[in-house]
Image: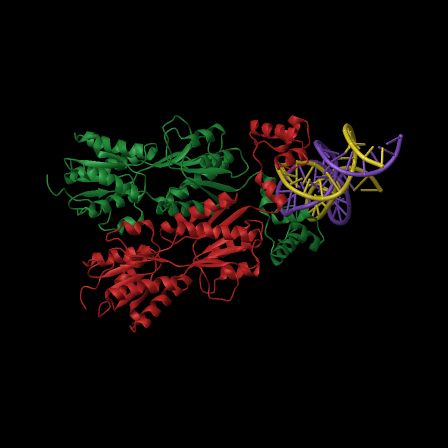
Chain colours: A red, B green, C yellow, D purple
Amino acid sequence: MHVTQKDIARKLGISITTVSRALAGYSDVAEETRQRVLQTAQEMGYSPHLLARRLQKQRTDTIGFIMPTLAPRFSDPFFSEFIAGVGNEAASHEYDLLVSTHPPESESEMKAYERAAKGGWVDGLIIVRTREKDERIRLLCQYKFPFVSFGRTNESLDFAYVDEDGETGIKLLTQHLIDLGHRRIGFIRPPKDMMAGHFRLQGFMKAMAENDLPVRPEWIVEGDMTQRGGEQSMAVLLDVQPGITAVIAGNDLMAIGAMHCAQQRGLEVGKDISVAGFDDIPLAAYVKPSLTTLRQPIYEIGRMTCRMLIDLINGRFSHPPQVLLVPQLIIRSSTAPPASD
Amino acid sequence: MHVTQKDIARKLGISITTVSRALAGYSDVAEETRQRVLQTAQEMGYSPHLLARRLQKQRTDTIGFIMPTLAPRFSDPFFSEFIAGVGNEAASHEYDLLVSTHPPESESEMKAYERAAKGGWVDGLIIVRTREKDERIRLLCQYKFPFVSFGRTNESLDFAYVDEDGETGIKLLTQHLIDLGHRRIGFIRPPKDMMAGHFRLQGFMKAMAENDLPVRPEWIVEGDMTQRGGEQSMAVLLDVQPGITAVIAGNDLMAIGAMHCAQQRGLEVGKDISVAGFDDIPLAAYVKPSLTTLRQPIYEIGRMTCRMLIDLINGRFSHPPQVLLVPQLIIRSSTAPPASD
DNA sequence: GAATCCATCCAAAACGTTTTGGATCCACTT
DNA sequence: AAGTGGATCCAAAACGTTTTGGATGGATTC
């Protein structure tokens, strides 16, 4: 099997302790001994057995990410980019990234969080898509288990998070549409219990209110964060009378689904109707018409979230840090002045 | 910290051994003792310390996936779906999934593979995007380290793989275009060293040859598997004289980029020029026009690859299994007869 | 009563590494 | 010569769990 420190010690006629201390750079090992150990370790292909090391040090050096996988197809480019950010940051700190996949709000999801909270599996968790009364966050706070979430919650729990200011972002976007002349604007909100959707809807309502524009209940429809959900919600919105002239979707995938629905009905997006999203995934620039959206730096968010968690694990904060990022409005071809008043 | 078997033993006044054997269901523990142990374990919130268990059992119960992350943005929905498949399958066998992110063919990537091959980190690896003379596969074969790849290589190495039959698939797709009347067909190939690209190009060349159609070298351009790469390759192809009437891209993302490029030049996709891709990511159905492509069941491939690896780790094969899946042609609006002969 | 069998428990060793608390030897100082 | 300090090494314990190889006590059989 694999080479152990015992093998190196035997070969050099020294103790396992000295091998260990030499490899770890302890100053009480002679430089000559140290070089012999390093060389032999390399020649023998020694690689530390992490399980043993981690058991002894009472750390797993592992970041856990429990990924909420939607059915029927979980095909969101957000997550590949987020994982890339998390993974690269973890690696630069010599942490491993463990990914566990579960349908959101499932029994198996909660079991995974419990497993983590009980300790010994991972050193900390990254949470995404925070919910109202998020059971996951409650559990982890109860156990005082280290975690950082990408997203806020609606309870007075004190925990570390990175979030985008969805309210400010959607206010910007709504104002953009209002400035283009739109007055009847639909909103495809994320699932009701998602906190991001709550803030985004709030931003929409505030912008409309600040411009003394009414919002009719039927202009607000719930989607499920996939293209399909966006398409279905758009079908509902396009049946509303009098017709809406613009739609904001809670994320880019839903916006792309909404555009597809409009186009299937013979409408020209960016002319007959305007559509906007949130995320600025790379695909947003490549669809036809290219999508107006709000940009959040997904990769950077992944890195930042992970770095914050590692600092938290290592006791580098006296108080949980909380960062709110302001999204950037990216205007493309999917939004234009309404075709008629 | 967390509850150990020692805590349970102390509370019940029995040995650690009996606690362990009771929890593991050994028949030489009295049923009454077993129930007491189980109940106490639950009441105390006991969760096995996996590091210790895995060290003793000499297994990590972990599947490793070293994900090739492209710059500047790694935003490929293929991978979120693939990971979902792998993750769910791993979980159903009580394996953890460790994800390590590295730019393809980087030094850090090779170090990660070496680390795995030396043992003690993960029990087996999943490889994707196999290359010509794939150093990763050579290394793992040399160490006889368990792995399953999604993709083949061009060397006579005997290893387990799941792959799609890209040659047959692209032959189907090329024939579809030829049947529509296309004679000058461009091909945006994946990076030269990617084996999938090799088979796909081969399928293209064979279909053209079987129909006695010439292939000019300038019709074959290399992209990098992203929208941007597709866009740039399409820009080259659209400058070729006499003009091509259709383009096959090595994957959906490049096809979407290619369509965008054509549209920027005022061409109508599915009329002035036909474009097709490979993958059938969900977005392919939602872009305008919806994309003709070849479907591979990404989630199922993830599951299958993982299951195969777990069986391999557990010694369930006398010979490495090799599975070739036939892609399914999905005709949508991006392909149509050429506008003019 | 002695031997045997069975149910049921447990001490010890093991996994590989790290850390603590020395032990030894040599050189220098008093 | 004795004491001290420093360089350099090492045995043992620890981490938490699993597994091996018993040990013990009671019931049954001869």
In x, y percent, where is residue A200?
Answer: 37, 64
Image quadrant occupied by the C terminus of chain A: bottom left
Point out the residue furthest to the left here.
Answer: B341
* Residue drawn at point x = 29 percent, y = 69 percent: A218
* Residue drawn at point x = 63 percent, y = 57 percent: B44
Which quadrant holds residue B55? top right
In x, y percent, where is residue B60?
Answer: 54, 41
Q: Is residue B242 left or right of residue A308?
A: left
In x, y percent, where is residue A148?
Answer: 50, 55
Say which of B44 and B139 sits in front: B139
Q: Is residue A76 left or right of residue A147?
A: left
In x, y percent, where is residue B206?
Answer: 23, 30
* Residue drawn at point x = 24 percent, y = 53 percent: A289
Image quadrant occupied by the N terminus of chain A: top right
Which quadrant holds residue A57? top right
Say which of A284 and A179 sits in front: A179
* Residue drawn at point x = 41 percent, y = 49 percent: A299
The answer to whether residue A306 is seen in the rendering is yes
Say which of A141 and A208 sits in front: A208
The answer to whether residue B277 is seen in the rendering is no
Which quadrant holds residue B323? top left
Q: Is residue A132 above or below residue D22?
A: below
